[in-house]
Amino acid sequence: MSGHEIVLSVRGATKVYPGTQALKGVDFDVRAGAVNVLVGENGAGKSTLMKIIAGVEQPTEGQVLLRGEPVTLSGTAEAARHGIGIVFQELNLFPNMTIAENIFIGREKTRLGVDIDAGAQNEAARRLMERLEHDNPPDAKVGDLRIGEQQIVEIAKVLSQDARILIMDEPTSALSAAEVDILFRVIGELKSQGVAIVYISHRLEELVRIGDYITVLRDGRITGSQEMAQVDVPWIVRAMIGSASKDFAKTIHHEFGREILSVADMTLPRKGGGFAVDHVSLSLRAGEIVGIYGLMGAGRSELFDCIMGRQPGAKGRVTLDGAELAERSIHGRIKRGIALIPEDRKAEGLVQILSVTENMAMSSLTAFTRAKVHLDVNRERETVASYVKRLAVKVAGLDNPVSSLSGGNQQKIVIGKALMTGPKVLLMDEPSRGIDIGAKAEVFRVMRQLAAEGLGILFVTSDLDEVMELSDRIIVMANGRITGEMERKDATEERVVALSAPDGSGRHRAATEQNKELVL
């Protein structure tokens, strides 16, 4: 490989955790003025390698070289002093603080070192958000933003540090296609300034589009390293999982049952006027998988919140298995047979300090109690173990903290937790977010099997391939409304994309055209 100077190298990196070895003698080079792609299945060791470069973790063996000289990165502050910044896969933001305060946390702009210059911070934050083409005001609370908007704040925070080596771990996992396009333009600017970018993503076509060099990890070892111009998607998949197939789960043919879920005239007022969910009605049959497709801001996640009783201001009727739900609490709706896989697994799906067993059994503890007093720990562990096996979760032990798992395996734990409540209807909000192609196929096979057993599944996705391959029926949303509904056999990619951008919304139309370029 040639053409770009190597500014950072990792040599012979090995990382051992209790019960597992995350890295096994890894050599990795980072080149200036280029996008250095790192790819692999969940649990392959990508995030561990990045944490070593960013100073979050120390290698058990091996060393980091900066411009040929060995360096010890004892923490993120030390890495930052060497010009290394990282956008973590899991967001590290303070929801009760503003956008500007989050961007400059620990590096506040001050007046003569005495007090914080809020005006200067807000102005700098505004310029950064404008660069990323987002119009959220710098004094907006981060907790009020959607997950994709929070991801933009995380990226802005790292851009503000003027890093010369910038690590991006799944930076687009929560972004719409339009926002991905904006981010790629910013990456192009950074490359022209000589910034070295390390880029991790599970979206393979995205990697081919943005990358200059690619390194593939599998089970803690390097299995391939090439210039991007010399590889294609099948090569990447083969290096990742040992075969060239990245097919989604094939349909298990079965008859659908009766209507299991009905949502009638659901509305949710939006702050500042209008509706986040605008008079939405839909139905779901037992054994059916219905995909809801739309751009970010279409109202898809808000609709799920309404169905689950998470929005007290919502109006409309939810009928489950022929009986209208009077319960307005989340607990009540879980008890009646509705379960939700949230979009943000870290904030809403898991308790990071608790074990795998404690997380998976959290929503179904009553099923393991005797006389409503004593917890049957053995039966709880047996049940958790069966779901861990069924979902193919890679975990050293059930007592390990869930934070020790990779992002994709954490997502499987969230899915298992929902399934353990014995739902009749499963709501899945971006179920493949942060999951690699192998894990995605496993999750989708489970979804197909559950549907064949009579479970109704309603899932939200911004991935066109997913909605086309997995759905029995497709619903398209835009601006809080349903803009189209069709059986899978009648759907085309062009029709689905067009419906996600209704006439009269230039912003949505432009975003859809960018989305079309990315996924077709």
Image (spheres, rainbow, N blue to C red):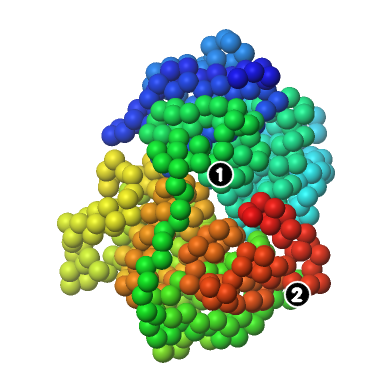
Q: Residue at the location (55% across, 81% down)?
A: 282
State the CA–CA distance, disc 2 to disc 1: 39 Å
Percent coordinates x, y for residue 157 in the rendering? 68, 40
- In this orientation, which residue lies closer to the viewer: 286 or 317? 286
Residue sticking out furthest to the top? 69
Q: Secondary structure at mark 2?
A: loop
Q: Type of residue at label 2?
A: Gly
Q: Nearer the viewer, residue 220 or 245?
A: 245
Tell me if residue 516 comes above or below residue 266 in the rendering. Answer: above
What residue do we see at 40% from left, 21% from top?
25
- Image location of residue 269, percent across then percent down: 67, 76
Helix, strand or loop under label 1 = helix
The image shows residue 238 at horizontal and vertical percentages of 45, 38
In the rendered picture of this protein, how many numbered marks are placed on residues?
A: 2
Image quadrant of residue 107?
A: top right
Give the quadrant of the C terminus.
Answer: bottom right
| Nearer to us: label 2 or label 1 | 1
Q: Nearer the viewer, residue 350 or 520?
A: 520
Tell me the quarter of the picture where residue 111 sits: top right
Quadrant placement of the N terminus = top right
Q: Is residue 509 visible?
A: yes
Percent position (x, y) of residue 301? Answer: 57, 66
Question: Going 17% across and 56% down the picture, which residue do you hit?
Answer: 378
Is residue 424 left or right of 195 when viewed as pictured?
left
Mark before the other along the chain sequence, 2 or 1: 1
Q: Amino acid at mark 1?
A: Leu
**131 with respect to 347 (left or right):** right
Residue name at image x 55 percent, y 27 percent: 226
- Asked if residue 126 shows in the view, the reply is no
Mark 1 burial class by Cα count in 10 Å: few <14, some 14-19, many 20+: some
Per the rendering, the mark at residue 273 is 2
Q: Determine which residue is flagged by label 1.
A: 204
